[in-house]
Amino acid sequence: MDSSSRPRYRVTYVIGSLATRSINRRLAQALVKLAPPELELHEAPIAGVPLYNYELDNAFPEPARAFKQAIADADAVLLITPEYNRSIPGGLKNAIDWASRPHGRNAFTGKPTAVIGASIGKVGTAAAQQHLKGVMNYSDAVLMNQPEAYIHFNEDAYSADGSVSDPALAKVLSGYMAAFRDFVVRVTTAGTAEAEPVAVRRS
Ligand code: FNR
C-alpha cells in the first residue's frame, strides 16, 4: 500500500503548559515530526480557555467551545502533560472538564487516547500521568496502556528545529507513535470489516 492510499487518522494533541518555552511543547514538536504517516496531528490549544463553570454548559465561551470541538472532531487524542506538584497542571484539567461536559455530551467518550509527558525531574511526569489516566478513565476515553513514556527532559537531545538529535530518544518516541497508530487503528476498526482477524487459541 503506498502512502497516499493509507487511511489517515486525525489526532488532536493537547499540551498541558502555557509557557512559550515549554519543554512539553518541545516534546510535542518532536512527536509530530516522528509520527507515522497515517497520523495527522493538530493542536487544540488550552491558552485562553476560561475556568470551568457548569452554569455556562449551554453557552460555552468561544475558546472552550473550540477546544471541545477539536476533541469531538478527532479520531484520537494525545495528551502531553507537564508535572506540577506531582499532578496535572490546573489549566489542562480545566480544559478536560469543559470537553467532558455537559453530562451526556462528553467529547471523550470512546476516543482512543494516549498520555505522555516530560519533566526536568527524573520521574519524567510519572505521577502526573497516573493522575491524568485516572481522569481520562472516568471521562470514558479508551486509554493506551502500553507503551508508557516518562520523558526526563535533556536539552541536548533536541535540535533547534524541534527534531530529536539523540538517536536513542528518537527511537523511543517514534516507537511510541507507531504503537499509538496501531492502537488507534485497533480501537477505531474493532468490530468492523477492516478489523484485523484475531487468532483464537483453543485448548
Ligand atoms: C514543577 N516542576 C516539577 N517537576 C517534576 O518533575 N515534578 C513536579 O512535581 C514538579 N512540580 C512543579 C510545579 C510547578 C508549579 C512548576 C512550575 C514546575 C518542574 C517542571 O518539570 C518544569 O518546570 C517543566 O519545565 C514544566 O514543563 P513545561 O511547562 O516547561 O512544559
Image: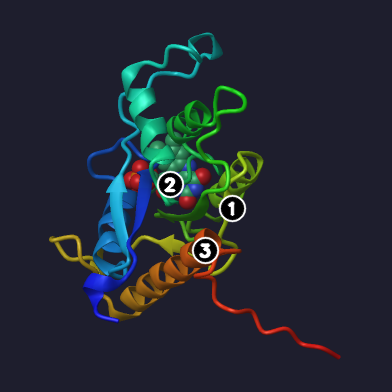
Left or right of 132, for residue 165: left
Please, which residue is most extreme toward the left here? 161
Marking on residue 59: none
Residue 175 visible in the picture = yes
Q: Which part of the image, by quadrant, shows the N terminus?
A: bottom left
Q: Nearer the viewer, mark 1 or mark 2?
A: 1
**Mark 2 CB lies closer than 8 A to ligand 1:** yes
Residue type highlighted by circle 2: Pro
- At 59% from the left and 49% from the top, the residue drawn is 133
Mark 3 CB within 8 Å of ligand 1: no
Nearer the camera: disc 3 or disc 1 = 3
Say which residue label 2 marks: 82
Taking the spot 55% from the left edge, 32% from the top edge, the residue there is: 106
Image quadrant in which you'd find residue 153: bottom left
Q: Is residue 100 above or below residue 164?
A: above
Whole-number angstrom distance, CA of label 3 to CA of label 2: 31 Å
User: Residue 173: x and y, percent?
Assistant: 37, 70
Q: Name which of mark 1 and mark 2 comes first in the sequence.
A: 2
**Pointer 3 or 2: first along the chain:** 2
- Amino acid type indicated by mark 1: Val
The residue beneath circle 1 is: 142
For disc 2, the neighbor class at 10 Å (few under 14, some 14 to 19, many from 20) is: many
Label 1, secondary structure: give it.
strand
Per the image, label 2 sits on a secondary structure element best described as loop
Percent position (x, y) of residue 142? 59, 53
- The residue indicated by pointer 3 is 189
Whether pointer 1 and pointer 2 mark residues with C-beta atoms closer than 8 Å, the reply is: no
